């Protein structure tokens, strides 16, 4: 019959082995989970999809047909000043709406 001291030592040994197995399993599970878990969100996955490399031939043809104006042609265009600029007065904008358009007609400083 084992003594009380031996029974106590054997109980501590069993608890120690089970604790070691539990901690070892926990660490192994955490390492495997972190190695296989992705940190990329669904939004990021959609953002990193490759772009299509198809070029629309119609767009290329429209770009080729565009007119190219030379500096000589642009220099020959005469611009006329606005009435407020012709008289030397500065136009003043009273209010601008949220979409950037004038909410009321502009006034001039006299």
Image: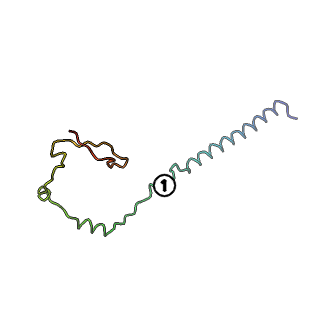
Q: Is 18 situated left or right of 30 in this image? A: right
Residue 28 at x, y = what percent? Answer: 62, 45
Q: Quadrant of residue 71?
A: bottom left
At 44% from the left and 55% from the top, the residue drawn is: 48
Asked whether 35 or 46 is in front, the reply is 46
Determine the residue located farthest toward the top in the rendered image: 5
Q: Is 82 situated left or right of 57 in this image? A: left
Mark 1, Cα crowd under 10 Å, few <14 / some 14-19 / many 20+, is few
At 62% from the left and 43% from the top, the residue drawn is: 27
Determine the residue located farthest toward the front in the rendered image: 110
Which SS class for mark 1?
A: helix
Asked whether 43 or 89 is in front, the reply is 89
Residue 78 at x, y = what percent? Answer: 13, 55
Q: Which quadrant of the figure contains the N terminus?
A: top right
At 13% from the left and 59% from the top, the residue drawn is: 73
Q: Quadrant of residue 89?
A: top left
Residue 70 at x, y = what percent? Answer: 14, 59
At 28% from the left and 67% from the top, the residue drawn is: 60
In the figure, 70 relative to 84: above or below?
below
Colour mapping: rainbow
Determine the residue located farthest toward the right in the rendered image: 1
Residue 75 at x, y = what percent? Answer: 12, 55
Asked whether 103 or 22 is in front, the reply is 103
In the figure, 24 relative to 75: above or below?
above
Q: Is 57 situated left or right of 89 in this image? A: right
Counting every numbered tag in the picture gives 1
Asked whether 8 or 109 is in front, the reply is 109
Q: Which quadrant of the figure contains the C terminus?
A: top left
Per the image, the residue denoted by label 1 is: 45
Q: Quadrant of residue 84?
A: top left
In the figure, 53 relative to 3: above or below?
below
């Amino acid at each position: 019959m084992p003594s009380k001291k031996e029974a106590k030592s054997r109980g501590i040994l069993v608890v120690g082995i089970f604790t070691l197995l539990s901690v070892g399993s926990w660490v192994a599970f955490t390492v495997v989970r972190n190695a296989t878990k992705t940190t990329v969100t669904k939004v990021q996955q959609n953002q990193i999809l490759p772009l299509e490399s198809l070029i629309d031939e119609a767009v290329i043809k429209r770009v080729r047909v565009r007119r190219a104006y030379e500096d000589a042609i642009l220099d020959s265009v005469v611009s006329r000043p606005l009435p407020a600029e012709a008289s030397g007065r500065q136009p003043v904008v009273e209010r601008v709406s949220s979409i950037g358009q004038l909410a009321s007609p502009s006034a001039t400083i006299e």
